[in-house]
Image (spheres, rainbow, N blue to C red):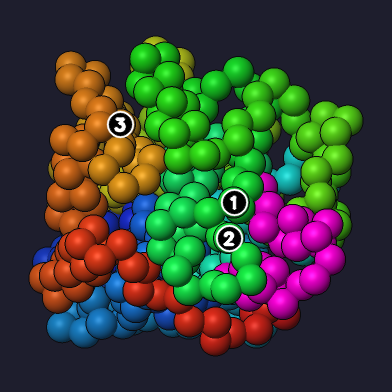
Amino acid sequence: MQDHHVVVVGGGFGGVQLVNDLKGAPVRVTMVDRRNHHLFQPLLYQVATTLLATSEIAWPIRNFFRDRPEVTTLLAEVVGVDSEARQVLLKNGQRIAYDTLVLATGATHAYFGHDEWEPVAPGLKTLEDATTIRRRVLLAFEQAELETDPAIRNALLTFVIVGAGPTGVELAGIISELARTTLPKEFRNIDTSKARIILVEAGPRVLAAFAEDLSDYARRELESHGVDLRFGKPVTSCTAEGVTIGDVFVPCRTIVWAAGVQASPAAKWLDIPADRAGRAVVDKELRAPGKGDVFVIGDTAAVMRDDGSPVPGIAPAAKQQGAYVAKVIKAKLAGKPAPGPFRYRHQGSLATIGKSAAIIDFGWLKLRGWLAWWVWGLAHIYFLIGVRWRIAVAWSWLWIYISRQHSARLITQRESMREE
């Protein structure tokens, strides 16, 4: 074991990349996460919409580092940082001393001051969120099959997704496919193809981060899938009975929140400035200002590019930041100059709308439709961890493509998200 102790809080893309890139460095590493698994979050919506099982997009963190004796993995929750004593504070009262600290604690969904909406409008950031949404979607069809009151039945068959970014668009497309293609032959008292999927966006268009022509293509595809698009008015109320869009009440029983994110409280732990989303403002080396060897990366950090635009909160950005901090640590321990400031390399934006429909913007090349859908699928399979899971996900997608049957439609759990 080496003397220099690196503590990494968070086993997401940034944290795992950092630990992988520290292999061979003269350090001992402690990774702390409140869950025992690494989550491939870009495909989380596919668990929520019955396409994939949880085990196909999440893997035990300990398994990654089983052959790395210098790496210790702890299942624990961090509640603070004592930067004066150079210690991480755990919920159970224990403290972990560090020489270098890296906070990669991610983000959760934000309700813009209406946290009381969360029980009826869950967001999608964790496996618990995904299985809760999946349960609610499937139960809505089951309860509608039993319901004799037409008004209640219509409310059960109405699904509202708030936010038309990539997550909202992907959810709307797959729920529509589930209702219109997968389920119709399985129910006798209801016509699932008549289900209403409403996608609400306070702005003027879907996928606002994409070029306008790609956004327009996505809008047309969603409309062809029967998705009801509502633009220009925010959600003003969410209850168990329905949602209010502007001043119009829509009865529904299933609401999914995909409208905003809120960073973990890392900035509060360190007592440093944060942006409006709670992300810690860091310097060009991703360090917490005035805190020595404390780095903040991924969705937890507000990182600015040279042109003044923020680095997006996506997996490739977190991985690049993890790799960069590993270089900084290794250079310091080797007595070499630090690498230059962090530079984000944008590798493209991707979103899928449903079966055989996707959009991709590489900057120099834009793709849409069937070809983009295949490129999107190959890219996601490539970035999955391990050959076994790449094969499993590819097989699941191939089966769904051929049979039109979603394979993960078991209702097995209670409302675990809220109980936690």
Structural distance between the alpha carbons of marks 2 and 3: 30 Å
Residue 315 in the image, given as x and y percentages of width and height? 34, 47
Determine which quarter of the picture holds residue 337.
Answer: top left
Q: Earlier in the sequence, mark 1 or mark 3?
A: 1
Q: Residue 103 vs residue 243: left or right?
A: left
Residue 281 in the image, given as x and y percentages of width and height? 55, 35
Q: Which residue is mark 2?
A: 191
As shown in the figure, which amino acid type bears the numbered disc 2?
A: Asp
Label 3 crowd bin: few (<14), some (14–19), many (20+), radius 10 Å: many
Callout 3 secondary element:
strand
Q: Are dots 1 and 2 in contact, CB under 8 Å? A: yes
As shown in the figure, which amino acid type bears the numbered disc 3?
A: Ile
Q: Which residue is mark 3?
A: 359
Structural distance between the alpha carbons of marks 1 and 2: 6 Å
Q: Residue 156 vs residue 192: left or right?
A: right
Instruction: State whether residue 374 is above or below residue 387.
Output: above
Q: Are dots 2 and 3 in contact, CB under 8 Å? A: no
Structural distance between the alpha carbons of marks 1 and 3: 27 Å
Q: Which mark is drawn over residue 365? A: none
Callout 2 secondary element:
loop
Q: Which mark is drawn over residue 194? A: 1
Residue for point 65% across, 84% down: 414
Q: Examine the residues drawn in magenta and state their main secondary structure.
A: helix
